[in-house]
Image: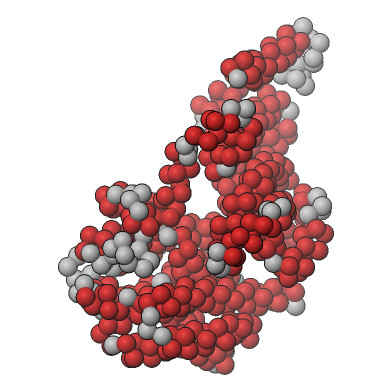
Amino acid sequence: MARERWLTLVSPLVLLALWEALARASVLDPRFFSMPSEIFARLIVLLQDGTLLANTAITLRRVAVGFVLATVPAILLGVAMGVSGVARALFTPLVAAIYPVPKIALVPMVVLLLGIGEPAKYAIVVISVFFLVALNTVAGVRNVDPRYFDIARNNGASKWDLIWTVALPGALPSILTGVSLGLGFALTVIVGTELLLPQGGLGAMIWAAYQVYDIPTIFAALIVVALLGFAANWLMGEVERQLVPWQANVRSLDRSNVRTKAEPRIRRFVRVWWMATRPFSFTASVVPVTLGAVLAAYDGYFDLWLFALTLIGSVLIHAGTNLANDYYDWKKGADTPESLGPNRALQEGMLTPQQVFIGALVCFGVGSLIGLYLVAARGVFILMLGILSVLAGWFYTAGPKAFAYIGLGEIVVFIFMGPVMVIGSYYVQVQAAPLHVVLLSLPIGFLVAAILHANNMRDLEGDLAKNKRTLANILGRQASKWEYLVLVVGSFVVLIALVLIGYAPLLALLPLLVLPTGISLVQRAFATDEPRKLNRVLRATASLHGWFGWLMILGFVGAIVGRLVY
């Protein structure tokens, strides 16, 4: 292994030395093949004057934003296609037809639709990466041994459990291969796009150097691109080693070492903190932020970079809120190891309460830094919303008069994870908060409040015994069921009313597809008082919120596409 590492370092050095010698001997024409010594001297100059760092940062930003926007939905679609024959039948022809098209050939069409600014460059990366990752994900899920799915079903696994515990872990090596290839392809495509649309970045730097026949600068930029590609490949190799350690272990000849090798520290760190932040709840922040941005696009305004920052910042504040809630609920005795649904990381001793508290501060801190950037870019209104959101998240369970302990939980969640998030996301794009946006945020607010209320219905007696006052135990068991009905059915009623009075297009009624699910949940909530059954109602309510929100978003996206076509 040591010899192989040395060879990895020596081979490029030998190549550079040979290149230098041949160029000095004029075997290679120095007009076209600048000497490595000259190229590295130019690299130092470009680093010192900031040109290289500035252009590298632009390229990396475009790669990162486009890569994330492509990879996440590609994995979701790939998993859906892998486990669902219906999804596979619907999407396979489209993916198979578009994937072979040279992505650089799509640049003119993208420019026609989005102009020559940043959205066009992000879109090229998304198109280039999406299909590659999706196809690898499908292949990975389809290659999982069907017996694993059968075993999971026989042990009572739900459809979500099958995806989370069987399909995703089994397909992870293939997914990571697709992600690794996609990351390298994203870098290749963005540099090519910057050559065609030279507005900053390493590709634009290469084009500008070509225009004045500055060969050393061209090679210097190419070296940076090569180093970025090498770094991306190393990074994905390290990610694979941490997330899929059994891949490396299988290749090992020492089988006893395979059995005793502990979980890698980085992988454990990611797994524990991922669990602690309760990522399954993030749809409650992702949906309203996305809806606000789509409403802005419907009104003719959209900036992809600002949307990405808003989304990341909102999820971080949400994660910080989850961690702070878990810390204070645990500290106040509202959550115990016997409780249904507390933070497993605390429950099982994976993290100490102090670590969870510090994690909450970190999430709030980073989310607030992103918020300050948005304030600088879009104005003081965002600052007010941000401060109120952080305070609401922290004091939801903190302090002697925490909102969740005095019957204000549903109201705070309704306001801040409904109207405030939608309006804030819209304002970042448009710098306005019109009435129709406020009204269109109400259905999302009703349903996110319904999630919390279902949680409080489940814990009604337990919360009452621990002096935690919620609307559920203030109203009593029967009246709390009627509140749940108002929240769930009210979301559909408000949406229908908004479409009828012209505040939303007809396609915004797509959430009516899940109205039968909502009615079924209300019936189940009225039919039982058993906490474990209400726990299933809680999970299904969260799913209903997600489906309702995404269908509403899809309706507005369809209306936008309809405008572009006609």
Q: Residue at x 73, y 67 (%)?
A: 85
Residue 295 coordinates in the image, percent (x, y): 55, 74
Observer-nearest residue: 67 or 437? 67
Observer-nearest residue: 163 or 276? 163
Figure check: 336 above or below 209: below
Residue 146 coordinates in the image, percent (x, y): 69, 58
Observer-nearest residue: 160 or 448? 160
Judging from the image, the colouring scheme is secondary structure
Residue 386 coordinates in the image, percent (x, y): 35, 63
The residue positioned farthest toward the left in the image shown: 400
Q: Residue at x 54, y 30 (%)?
A: 256
Q: Residue at x 82, y 59 (%)?
A: 97
Residue 334 in view, yes or no: yes
User: Where the N terminus falls, by quadrant?
Assistant: top right
Figure check: 370 above or below 399: above
Q: Is residue 452 left or right of residue 80?
A: left
Q: Is residue 410 left or right of residue 559?
A: left
Figure check: 74 above or below 189: below
User: Where the C terminus falls, by quadrant?
Assistant: bottom right
Q: Is residue 325 left or right of residue 566?
A: left
Q: Residue at x 60, y 35 (%)?
A: 248
Figure check: 78 above or below 539: above
The residue positioned farthest toward the top in the image shown: 25
Residue 428 in view, yes or no: no
Q: In this figure, what is the number of numbered marks?
A: 0
Residue 298 coordinates in the image, percent (x, y): 59, 74
